Amino acid sequence: MLWLCLYFPQCDAQALKQVSVWAGQFTSRVSPSPPNAVLMEIGASLAYFGGLEALRSRINTGLERLAIVAASGIAPTPTAAWMLARSGDDTPITTRNDLRERLALLPITSADPKHKTMAALQGLGCQSIGEVRALPLAGLTRRLGREFIHQLQRAYGERPDPRDAWHPPHKHQSDCELAAETTHTDQLKPYMHSLIEALCGHLRSLNSGVMRLEFSLLHRHQAITPLTIGMLRPSHDPIRIKTLLDHRLERLSSPAGVIGLRLEAGDFQTMTPQRGDLLDGDKDAPDNDAWQGLVENLNQRLGKQRVRGLRLQAEHRPERAWCYQRPGELRDTKQSQASVPLRPFWLLPHPAPLESVAGRPNYHGPLILEDGPERIESGWWDGADISRDYYRARSPEGEKLWVFRDRRGTRDWFLHGIFA
C-alpha cells in the first residue's frame, strides 16, 4: 500500500467533506481524518494514472483549481503519510525499508503530541522522532503513555493502522462565501468554476454524470437568485460545464450584490462507455458531441425555450404531422418512415390559394401535375376534418411544388409546400 495525506492548516468540516468527495476520482479508498486531513490509498491507482509523479501532478493541479492550499505526504502507512504532511516533507517514502530512516528525522511536533506528552518529551530532551525511539520502550511508555507510543508504532508499520473507507453520497451540495460582495459576473466566475471542479470530482468518483445543476446566488437582504445549467446528456466534464456556465452568465442580471454561492446537483446517472469501431474506421460518422455541444451553448445563450427540434407524428393531416421537441430527443413513433409518401421540406404555415384556368392550377404560369393524386381524408373526430387530393407539380420556372385540390365546396386549388 501507498498512502497520500492532504493536510490543511485551516479547514472546516464542510471543506473537509468537499475535498473527500473530490478526492474519490483518484482512488476508491478515501478516508477523512478530522479535523484537517484527508487520507488516500493511491498504490492501486498508480498504473492507471501513469505513475506516482503523474498522479501527484493531477492532484496538485486539481487543488489549484479548487483554490485550496494543502501540504502532502506520501508513505506506506497512513500515519506516516500524515506525519510527513504535518512536517511539510513532500518527498515520498515508497518502501517500508525507508520508513525508519526518514521518520527518525522528523520533529516530534509532526506527531502532534498532547500538551502533557509534549512537556514530558521536552523534559527528556527529545527533539526528533528518532531520539524518542532510541529510548527504552518500557520506561518511555510509563512516562508518555500508550497512546503516543502506539501512534509511532502505527507510523512505522509495527502495529495495524486500519482506516475506514468513506463512501460519497449520490447527491451534491457545496457552498462558497465570497471575499467581498460583488455585482459583477466576471468576479463570480472563479468561485463558480471552483465549485464545478469539486462537483465533477464527486461525479467521477462514482462514474456518474448529471444533466442539470442548480446554482443559487446568495444576497444580503434579498431572496436568492437561481441559475440553472442544463445539458442534453449526462456529463462530468468540468470544461464543458464551465463553458455552459459562462454562456449563461452572459444573460444573467443579478438584482443585488452577491455575498455567497451554493451549488446543488442530484439525479446522478451512471456513465456508460461509448461504443465504437475497434479500428476506428467510421471517419465519416457525425460527431454527436459537436452538435450536442452546439445545442447546449445555444440553450444557455438564447434560452432553452428558443432552441427546439422537430419530429414526425402519426397524423395524416400534413399541418399536424409534426411537432416540436427537445433537440436530439428520440421517441418511438407508430408511423414507419417507409410508409410516408414523399413530402416537401418547406411546408407553408397555411395553404395559399392558387388561380386556376379551366380547372388547371397556375403558379407563375400553368402547372404540370407530375404525380398524384394522393387523397387525404382525416380529422372528422376533432372538427378540423379535411378532404384533399394532393399532387406533385412543376411550374414553368422549374419549381417543384406540392399542391392540392379541395374536394368539397368550390374545389379550389392550393399551394401547400415547396420541394427543396
Image: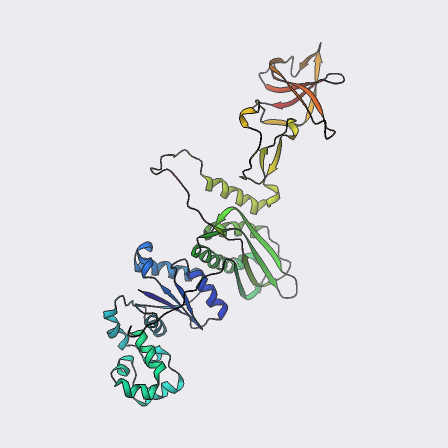
Q: Residue at x 29, y 80 (%)?
A: 129
Report if residue 67 is visible in the image: no
Question: Residue 264 location in percent, x, y?
Answer: 55, 58
Quarter holding the N terminus?
Answer: bottom left
Report if residue 304 is visible in the image: yes
The answer to whether residue 272 is magenta is yes
- Judge left or right: residue 196 versus residue 276: right
Question: Residue 213 location in percent, x, y?
Answer: 54, 54
Quarter holding the C terminus?
Answer: top right
Magenta-highlighted residues? 271-277
Residue 412, image quadrant: top right
Question: Residue 19 location in percent, x, y?
Answer: 45, 64
- 404 over 229 or under it: above or below: above
Query: Magenta part mainly helix, strand or loop?
Result: loop
Residue 32, image quadrant: bottom left
Q: Residue at x 45, y 36 (%)?
A: 286
Residue 44, image quadrant: bottom left
Q: Residue at x 26, y 83 (%)?
A: 131
Q: Which residue is drawn at 70% across and 14% down?
A: 356
The answer to whether residue 390 is magenta is no
Number of marks drawn:
0
- 74 over 411 or under it: above or below: below
